[in-house]
Image: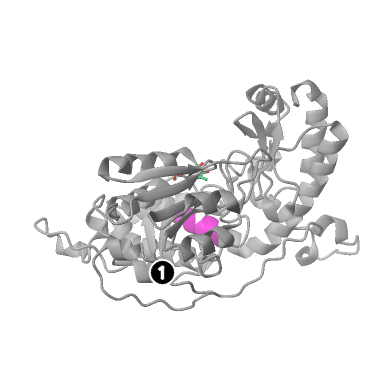
Amino acid sequence: MALGRPAALFQVLPVDELRWEDMSAGRVHDLGENLTMATRSAADSTLAAAPLPDRIRHRFPIFERRLYVNSCSQGALSDAVRAAYEQYLADWDEKGAPWEYWVERGEAARATFARLVNAAPDEVAVTTSLSAGVSGLASGLRYARRSKVVLTDWEFPTIGQIWHAQEARGARVVHVPEAADGTIPLEHFDRAIDDDTLLVSITHVCYRNGAKLDVEAVTRLAHERGALVLLDAYQSIGSLPVDVRELDVDFLAAGVLKYLLGSAGLAFFYACRELVERVWPTATGWFADRDIFAMDHRDYSPAPTASRFQSGTPPIPAIYAGIAGMELMEEIGIAETREHVLGLHTRLLDGLDALGARAATPREPERRGALLCVASTDAPALVAALDRDGIVTSSRAGNLRISPHAYNSVEDVDGVLDALARNRRLLA
Ligand SMILES: Cc1ncc(COP(=O)(O)O)c(C=O)c1O
């Protein structure tokens, strides 16, 4: 559904005409609550038909020592990612400075991420963090004709900080609050987005409570009012299908270290092709240049592609690892992972109910990501108690964060529930 790249564009750069075509891909996600372990019969004896974790778990050695359910923070290390880091060292050691090959690896990472989100490679910037890409965007917008940036109270701190930093350049930042039931209803966006709104900055899945936003609805509303949309997809990418055409967002940023199984140091920034040349990043560097080999220190000519949101030397070691992680997730299957994790959630939620614990994440499967949060009287103490039992979790805002991924099993969920039962006094 094309609503037109909105009026806000025209103030980004003075371009007279704007072409916009419908590029929505029409993919449908199956968010069924059931699946894998419950419906698979014992007759599933071939490896290909085995439950997801049985097929892949051996590739993640941490499970020999720990029960790992903390992918919202960092994905588990796989044999493939370890081998990628070893390969980086071998290439460095054997070839010295193979920069042509390393630049090609950056292009391979760009193409892999583009494929994952259904973008074209020239719509993707290779960055060192989500913050770097979003800062490039923020530095390239003008806050004159439209000055308002609307963001939610579910944003990761870096998003709020970057937009508030733009107040010095004329931006007016407005927060969309959460309702008492822990959701952000569309009416709240309706009240905040107006014809002075330049950009709406939203997060796909909240890092604090695991709630998933109805991105399409917010985007439709923003576009109707001529505003652009930036999506922070860090807590969703790799855990469920993310398609920039289907979501119809203008910009998207995400990194590889969580459900994409990569490491710190590599992220990506997507900018819809129609918008790229209308943004003029002033936070920049030589890898954003039209021709990085021109080595021209007397000129700033940003690339005509999304590479203009890049900065300095690319994070080569993290690129090796990130390609390995993303390819492994492609091989495992992101749609299948989503179904598998929702099945684990059902078991987890039933177990929490039996314990009288309170889930801080919405019950409806389409309103949550892979992260499931549990209210606690002392979340750091609960994380520490679970850690003593060999279970790796994390906490935010008073909630225990449990974030199952493709490699987690029914037994993992039962292990977590047993440990929570032993620590019942720390559940709110
Ligand atoms: C939703 C979300 N956005 C952004 C970030 C941080 O991104 P970066 O450190 O790459 O800028 C995180 C990290 O945990 C996150 O969960």
Left or right of 270? Residue 205 is right
Q: Please count the marks in the image.
A: 1
Quarter holding the C terminus is top right
Left or right of 92? Residue 80 is right
Vertical relation: 299 (above or below) 377: below
Residue 22 location (% of width, % of height):
48, 78
Residue 247 location (% of width, % of height):
54, 65
Compare residues 48 and 400 and report the one nearer the observer: 400
Residue in the picture at 66% in, 49% down:
370
Residue 390 location (% of width, % of height):
70, 30
Q: Is residue 203 magenta?
A: no
Q: Is residue 321 magenta?
A: yes
Residue in the picture at 86% in, 64% down:
44
The magenta stretch spans which residues? 320-327
Left or right of 241? Residue 348 is right
Residue in the picture at 69% in, 46% down:
404
The answer to whether residue 405 of the structure is visible from this angle is: yes
**Residue that carries the numbered disc 1 in the rendered image:** 5
